[in-house]
Image: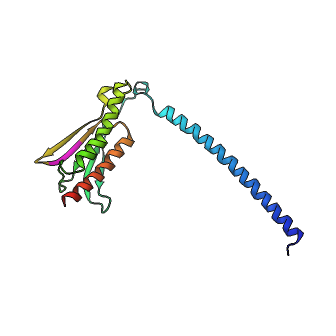
Amino acid sequence: MSTEAEVKELADLKQWIEEKVRSLEDELALLKKMMLIVDKQLTERSFVKAAEVPSVAKPAMQIERRQLKRQSDGYLLGEAEIYDDNVKINIAQDVILRSSTPPFKSYFIGKILGGMRGEDEKQAEQGKLEKDKVLQYDIEEEGGRIRSITVKGYRNKARLNEILSTAIWTFTRMLEKQA
């Protein structure tokens, strides 16, 4: 049997828990409001027209290099040379990729690069993007083999990462089909 003191202690504990839950719910609601404010500010400040960005003298063009490796075993597929707004994907010497092998044209060129180019062309038509900033790409082939892919005007890190990760995925699928 419970004593009156135990019942009082349990009631006090329940009241403390309820107050704590209310306090945490209030704090969560406030944090969500603050996140909305921060998101709104980021959106407003991140999407600034190029003409509105202050001009800053750029240092000499630097190259960042990234190895493109197959996820499953780390096999080297190629290397990306990343410039300010261009990337050149050089296929590794021992990797044989042909542009006729799916899903190169349909997915990588058609959906990914073509999709980005289409978005850019739409923005250029609306006057939101200069025509010379529309994404361009060039595929260098030698004897039917893809040697390199150059993409000009990727414009932001998210697009660059999408291009590189999709290239890795596409090259991996192509090698599987050729095996």
Residue at image position (30%, 43%) is 111
Q: Nearer the viewer, residue 37 or 63?
A: 37
User: Where 43 falls versus 22 (above or below)?
Assistant: above
Q: Quadrant of residue 114?
A: top left
Residue at image position (44%, 25%) is 52
Specify whether residue 82 is in view: no
Magenta highlight: main SS? strand
Determine the residue located farthest toward the left in the rendered image. 143
Instruction: Indicate the position of residue 88 as horizontal and vertical percent values.
Output: 25, 43
Q: Is residue 109 left or right of residue 126?
A: left
Q: Is residue 158 left or right of residue 111?
A: right
Instruction: Indicate the position of residue 60 as horizontal and vertical percent values.
Output: 31, 35
Q: Is residue 27 left or right of residue 173?
A: right
| Residue 69 among those drawn in magenta | no
Residue at image position (34%, 29%) is 122
Residue at image position (51%, 36%) is 42
User: Where 76 falls versus 58 (above or below)?
Assistant: below
Instruction: Indicate the position of residue 149 as horizontal and vertical percent values.
Output: 23, 43
**The residue stretch that appears in magenta:** 145-149
Instruction: Indicate the position of residue 134 as horizontal and vertical percent values.
Output: 30, 31
User: Where 140 falls versus 53 (above or below)?
Assistant: below
Q: Nearer the viewer, residue 61 or 113?
A: 113
